[in-house]
Image (cartoon, rainbow, N blue to C red):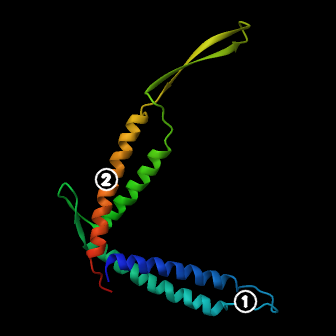
Amino acid sequence: MTISQLLRKISKLKGEVQEQRSRAESATVYNEKETPAFGFEDSHAAAEKAVEELVRLKSALRKANAGTLVTLSGGQPICLAEATCRLQELKSRIAWLKTLTVQAKERRDVETVEYDTLAGQRIKVMNVFLCPFPEGKRAAALKEAQDAFDGLNDLVETANHQTVVSL
């Protein structure tokens, strides 16, 4: 079984655990006249059995990820475990960059009119808004992070389809 196949199996098992736990939960308290479709004991036992299999598969995945190397574009080898951590951090960085409030330029002057109560008149006030990371820099950083993510993800996907996991 390859890592890709194992990941699909793990995902399916996670869904099974969730489903069995949901069934068990719905049978914890019920009206005796309305017996639940699934009994608590059977559903709970099925969930626990699936959890044991999930732990076994996740452990095998972690061992495979720790022992499988991929080579970065610069020639540096790293294990899949590190590569997946790097992918998670790149994904987080991309999401963060997309949420940053920026402006087009590093400096923006905005003139407003305010009322000066001491002078009893309206006055013009110049507000200067600074942005050390304007739209252009953010766009470049986003492209760099996305390119790094895409390149590393391709390496990981290729390794996942080629690496056989021993169970």
Q: Position of residue 28 (x, y in %)?
A: 71, 85
Q: Tag 2's secondary structure?
A: helix
162 or 26, which lies in front? 162
Quick check: 122 left or right of 140?
Answer: right
Q: Between 1 and 77, which is closer to the camera in this rendering?
A: 1
Residue 81 percent coordinates (x, y)? 32, 67
Residue drawn where x is 60% and y is 82% of the image: 21
Residue matched to label 2: 148
Circle 1 SS class: loop
**The one of 166 and 108 positioned closer to us in this rendering:** 108
Q: Is residue 109 above or below residue 60?
A: above
Q: Is residue 34 above or below residue 112?
A: below
Q: Tell me which corner region of the image, top left, top right, bottom left or bottom right, holds residue 78.
A: bottom left
Q: Position of residue 19 (x, y in %)?
A: 59, 81
Residue flagged by tag 2: what amino acid is it?
Answer: Ala
**CA gap, disc 1 and disc 2:** 51 Å
Crowding around mark 2 (Cα neighbors within 10 Å: few <14, some 14 to 19, many 20+) is some
Residue topped by disc 1: 36
Amino acid of disc 1: Pro
Q: Residue at x 55, y 86 (%)?
A: 47
Q: Is residue 106 left or right of residue 109?
A: left
What residue lies at 81% left-to-right and 88% top-to-bottom? 31
Find residue 7 and report its horizontal and vertical position in percent. 39, 76
Q: Which of disc 2 and disc 1 is earlier in sequence?
A: 1
Residue that protrudes farthest toward the left in the picture: 75
Q: Residue at x 51, y 38 (%)?
A: 101
